[in-house]
Image: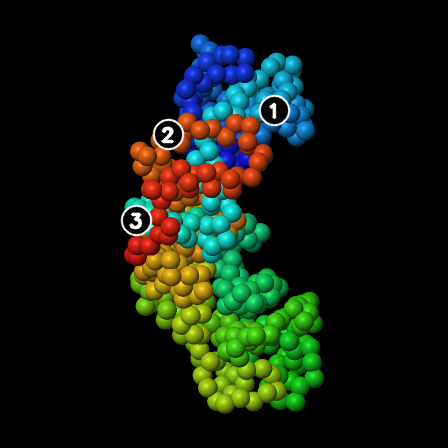
């Protein structure tokens, strides 16, 4: 027995509520189970219960054993004084509030079915790429699509929340924050943190002072990156080095450690030197990035924002002092798409939300829906399971589902997991009468075996997944 399953059974009312009563014999009716609390304090907030003849409104706390209340020190925490019901799997000790009054207790030992435990065991112990890989085809397209809509919004909100933290540090400087996250996105997975650090150490206002000269903008960014802390053979990096030394002294600048940057297993087009040169060119070519992103009428206009032409030196170099075949080093399509997904869309979503401008907020969502689906290992695995994505909006949803729910096996908090835990036919109803009882601390794989044997005539050895288009 896990406390998460107890939470699920209570929240979804997946327990036997016949003749429900406290351990003192008072009748209990659950009018509303409350909202699951993901922060400190009682597990469920604002529940409404009828206990005896009185309707109570307050919070509900849950434990596997009543004595856990004392082990967790709730008796001295005033946040738990308004708990109106203590829901436990096993009642092994009387519990009181800090003021000495008793808390009604509801024991669930004989109220949670073995069938629910068997299905839960299957999901949690699954070694598949996602816990429900073999049963995903049993979930309706409606359930899947609604949940993926939720996942897309959750991922966007999560990104917007991180941007919001940075925005507050920047004192509501939208352009500065946009510039910092643009730099971060251009760094990719490997150099995201160093690129953001570079942007934070080189304020946009300082770069704007010199944006009439691409050479000076490059000197500032390469100097601040620490990549000019070397001895060079080529004239161009030596000139950058000389210019940076002057600007460093003038503005009291401190460069990053050059060891911060990573090159291992990167394609030359993704080297930090190229990314910094591209960032410098974007600053040189245009100012007011965020304002332009908000004003863009469509995806084509937004993509034009990333059309850049690097300075001559970078046409035949990927790093300082190492000549390469002459080639334009524009921002690649995948990089531009990543920047739009990870910075532009969530920034527009956040701005529209903060300013109450639905047009800007919806533009953030619309951008994701119009971008083609991302191509990566996670999306390919979902496709193998029969879930095809039609846009970046859908791939972002699938990434959120895999990373935040499937990998940590939060099946009880997932609509797909919930759907799979529900009875699938009338033939399963008798199984609901078999409760876990005293077997709650035993190996639940036995429940799964029992369940398979009891309903082998209704179970399929394997499930043929139906291809779903979202």
Q: Position of residue 184 (x, y in %)?
A: 53, 64
Question: Residue 424 at x, y = what percent?
Answer: 33, 39
Relative to 430, is 261 above or below? below
N-terminal of the pair, mark 1 or mark 2, is: 1
Secondary structure at badge 2 equals: helix
Name the residue: 42% across, 49% down.
Answer: 132
Towards the viewer: 61 or 300 = 61
Residue 177 vs residue 427: left or right?
A: right
Give the residue number, with chain letter if any, for mark 2.
430
Task: Looking at the picture, tell me which residue is in the foreground, 332 or 114.
Answer: 114
Which picture quadrant has residue 429?
top left
In which quadrant of the rendered view does residue 369 lie?
bottom left
Q: Residues within 10 Å of mark 1 (few under 14, many from 20)?
A: many
- Residue wearing tag 1: 66
Q: Earlier in the sequence, mark 2 or mark 3?
A: 3
- On the rendered structure, is 96 left or right of 181? right
Quadrant assignment for the C terminus = bottom left
Task: Give how far across and how far down residue 278 sits, in percent.
Answer: 50, 75
Q: Are marks 1 and 3 in contact (CB under 8 Å)?
A: no
How far apart are the alpha carbons under marks 1 and 2?
30 Å
Observer-side mark, 2 or 3, equals 2
Q: Earlier in the sequence, mark 1 or mark 3?
A: 1
Q: Left or right of 362: which side holds 444?
A: right
Viewer-nearest residue: 148 or 216: 148
Circle 1: element type: loop
Q: Which residue is mark 3?
A: 141
Q: Distance from label 2 to label 3 (Cα)?
A: 28 Å
């Amino acid at each position: 027995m896990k406390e998460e399953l107890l939470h699920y059974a209570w929240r979804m009312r997946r327990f036997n509520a016949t003749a429900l009563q406290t351990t003192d014999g008072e009748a209990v009716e659950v009018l509303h189970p409350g909202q699951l609390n993901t922060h400190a304090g009682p597990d469920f907030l604002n529940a409404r219960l009828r206990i005896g003849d009185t309707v109570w409104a307050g919070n509900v706390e849950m434990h596997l054993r009543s004595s856990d209340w004392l082990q967790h020190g709730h008796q001295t925490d005033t946040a738990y004084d308004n708990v109106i019901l203590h829901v436990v799997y096993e009642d092994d000790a009387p519990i009181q509030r800090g003021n000495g009054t008793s808390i009604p207790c509801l024991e669930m030992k004989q109220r949670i079915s073995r069938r629910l435990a068997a299905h839960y065991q299957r999901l949690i112990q699954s070694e598949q790429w996602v816990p429900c890989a073999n049963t995903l085809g049993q979930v309706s397209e409606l359930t899947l699509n609604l949940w993926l809509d939720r996942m897309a919004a959750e991922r966007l909100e999560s990104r917007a929340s991180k941007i919001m933290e940075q925005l507050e540090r920047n004192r509501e400087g939208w352009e500065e924050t946009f510039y910092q996250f643009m730099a971060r996105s251009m760094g990719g997975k490997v150099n995201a943190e160093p690129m953001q650090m570079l942007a934070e150490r080189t304020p946009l206002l300082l770069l704007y002072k010199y944006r009439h000269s691409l050479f000076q903008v490059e000197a500032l960014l390469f100097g601040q990156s620490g990549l000019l802390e070397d001895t060079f053979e080529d004239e161009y990096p030596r000139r950058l080095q000389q210019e940076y030394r002057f600007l460093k002294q003038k503005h009291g600048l401190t460069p990053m450690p050059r060891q911060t940057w990573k090159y291992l297993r990167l394609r030359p087009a993704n080297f930090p030197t190229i990314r910094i040169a591209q960032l410098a060119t974007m600053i040189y070519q245009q100012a007011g990035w965020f304002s332009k992103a908000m004003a863009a009428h469509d995806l084509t206009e937004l993509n034009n924002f990333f059309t850049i032409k690097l300075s001559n030196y970078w046409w035949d170099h990927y790093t300082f002092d190492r000549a390469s075949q002459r080639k334009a080093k524009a921002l690649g399509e995948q990089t531009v798409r990543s920047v739009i997904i990870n910075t532009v869309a969530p920034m527009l979503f956040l701005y529209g939300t903060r300013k109450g401008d639905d047009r800007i907020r919806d533009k953030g969502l619309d951008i994701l829906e119009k971008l083609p689906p991302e191509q990566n290992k996670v999306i390919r695995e979902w496709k193998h399971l029969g879930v095809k994505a039609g846009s970046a909006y859908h791939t972002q949803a699938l990434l959120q589902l895999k990373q935040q729910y499937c990998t940590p096996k939060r099946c009880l908090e997932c609509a797909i997991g919930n759907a799979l835990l529900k009875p699938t036919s009338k033939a399963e109803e008798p199984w609901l009468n078999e409760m876990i009882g005293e077997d709650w601390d035993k190996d639940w794989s036995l429940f799964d075996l029992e369940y398979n044997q009891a309903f082998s005539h209704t179970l399929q050895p394997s499930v043929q997944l139906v291809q779903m288009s979202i």
